[in-house]
Image (tube, helix red, strand yellow):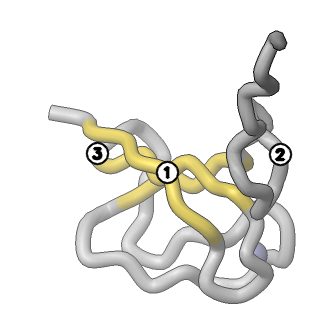
Amino acid sequence: MATAWFGPCPHCNASLSYLEGVAGSSMSPLCPRCKSVVTVSRATFLMADNSRPTAKAPLAVKPTS
Ligand SMILES: [Zn+2]
């Protein structure tokens, strides 16, 4: 069963999606940003996580009053 989790690249700290057990996954996947090998314990496919800003704190909810 494929699982996915999100974390930073250990090299360049880019936000990545770690997709485990999907087609094209590898035991030594390359970071899509810095092209360095990321060490993983399961076969993983790395994808840049563009759904949120890189290494930024979550947006604070502004009080309406
Ligand atoms: Zn990287």
The residue identified by callout 3 is 21
- For the residues labelled 2 and 3, the Cα–Cα distance comes to 26 Å
Residue drawn where x is 84% and y is 77% of the image: 34
Q: What is the CA distance from the residue labelled 1 to the residue labelled 2?
A: 13 Å
The quarter of the image holding the C terminus is top right
Earlier in the chain: of badge 3 and badge 1, it is 1
- Mark 3, Cα crowd under 10 Å, few <14 / some 14-19 / many 20+, is some
Mark 1 residue crowding within 10 angstroms, few (<14) / some (14–19) / many (20+): some
Residue lying at 76% horizontally and 63% vertically, measured from the top left: 55
Assess mark 2: CB under 8 A from ligand 1?
A: no
**Circle 2 sits in a helix, a strand or a loop, which is it?**
loop
Amino acid on which disc 3 is placed: Gly
Up/down of 37 relative to 49, above or below? below
User: In 3D space, how far apart are the residues under numbered discs 3 and 1 (Cα atoms)?
Assistant: 15 Å
Q: Which numbered disc, 1 or 2, marks the residue that appears first in the sequence?
A: 1
Residue 36: % across, % down: 72, 84
Q: Is mark 3 within 8 Å of ligand 1?
A: no
In the image, taking residue 48 as reference, residue 16 lies left or right, namely left
Please provide percent x and percent y for residue 53: 83, 45
Q: Is residue 58 above or below residue 28?
A: above
Asked whether 3 or 8 is in front, the reply is 8
The quadrant the N terminus occupies is top left
Q: Quadrant of residue 44?
A: bottom left
